[in-house]
Image (spheres, rainbow, N blue to C red):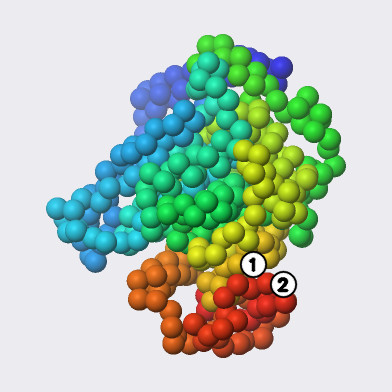
Amino acid sequence: MHYHAYEMAHALVAPARIAARATRTFLDLATPQPVRGWGFQNLMAGLELFDDMTRRYGKPEFGITSTQIHGLSVPIREEIVMRKTFCDLLHFDRDEKVAGKRYDPKVLIVAPMSGHYATLLRGTVQAMLPEHNLYITDWRDARGVPLALGHFDFEDFVDYVIEFLQFLGPNTHVIAVCQPSVPVLAAAAVMAAKSDPARPVSLTLMGGPIDTRRNPTVVNKLANEKPMSWFRDNVISQVPFPNPGFMRRVYPGFMQLTGFMTMNLERHTNAHIGLFDSLVKGDHDTVAQHRRFYDEYLAVMDLTEEFYLQTVETVFKEHLLPDGMLRHRGELVDCRAITDTALLTIEGEKDDICGLGQTEAAHDLCRSIPVDEKYHYVQPGVGHYGVFNGTRWRTEIQPRIREMIRTVQFKRRVGSTGVTVGLPYRSLHENREEIVEFGKPGNGAAGPKARPNSAGLI
């Protein structure tokens, strides 16, 4: 009944919200400027804050209309190049009339399906656009998908990734942000085992829960403490009428949002107190900055029951992928099948959702990737969100991804004999730097005894 209670609460508060908007509009038009004192500003700020805190936040738009390429402002056109029941494959087309014909690396960003829309990665997209031919998965809100159109589970997620890569063709680089790291790695392993020509050239896994037993967070501990029956009975609801997905059993987005906000309740409370103060003072820049973040953060989507429960069980409770027991359509998923896909893992030093070492675990699974194509980077001073958005992302993380992609592109094009560099895979604890010469015997697959412990290139 959670969903119905949530809808009822919105319905009950709607008249008060409408009254607050009408009162604010009336006072703004009827009150002369000379009498707008301290009390007036506080009343107007309170009415506006009430409106912000009680309204619905719909799916945001990417709103990226242009990008800068070599000093030129190049128009961007969003186009859906492939439609699936639960996801659209979105392409950011750069106007060739302005930018000219470009042969930038083709990159697929797999957005998280964890309660927020793909637009949460707007900053990720903006930083990658100037130098990459960019695609992104735009997941649909399960609340808007009719029950008659079928279900969507963890294996379907893997299938979607494979289908998108096959549609884009060979020589595609993949970036998985947070939750998709596990199904994306599984998809790469499935494609590698079948020698699929469309398998990714490189994988970048950012803040992903590959092995949540390493440095577990509050989120990981909760998943282990509660039995699956608890999740099924307490967080799953039916979509109420009149939504298109009426009667579909889902994990509501507002439940996920509640969990995220309670983890940092004091910070969010202080942010809204700060918003009130800024409204009173008329600090429009601060107000706009606050709203840009929360208009995105408070816009949430529902996940299908089967996808959510399978993810909890597969990733957070049974750890099937790191234990080598994950199956896809009946076939065992073996990450050792990945031999010619470069791997970059990125973690945030202060990540309280995906702890240090959880994403790095992918290197231990992908033992057949050459040691010179394994990269690991820990970004100091950032939490989970800062791994893919913000100043550190733009100035320190994204340049490393760009250089890795171009390094791999160059190597695939000219071969790798006779090139000498430092080993790129950096251990969390050891910083011993070594030198390896590509093309020499013994520098291929990195088995358990050949695991590198070196300072990285990036």
Q: What percent of the width, then of the height, locates residue 18?
A: 49, 18
Q: Amino acid at mark 2?
A: Pro
Task: Describe the element under mark 2 as helix, strand or loop.
Answer: helix
Query: In which quadrant of the rendered view does residue 404 lie?
Result: bottom left
Residue on which disc 1 sits? 367
Q: Which residue is mark 2?
A: 448
Q: Earlier along the polypeptide chain: callout 2 or callout 1?
A: 1
Q: Judging from the image, what secondary structure is the residue with disc 1 in?
A: loop
* Image: 414 above or below 103: below
Q: Is residue 121 left or right of residue 369?
A: left
Q: Nearer the viewer, residue 20 or 157?
A: 157
In this view of the protein, which residue sits in the foreground, 427 or 62?
427
Q: Position of residue 320 (x, y in %)?
A: 73, 48
Instruction: Estimate how packed mark 1 is, as few (under 14), some (14 to 19) or many (20 or more) residues with alpha carbons within 10 Å.
Output: many
Residue 34 in sight: no
Q: Residue 32: x percent and y percent?
A: 36, 29
* Residue at 64%, 67% in the rendered image: 367
Q: Amino acid at mark 1?
A: Arg
Residue at 69 percent of width and 51 percent of height = 321
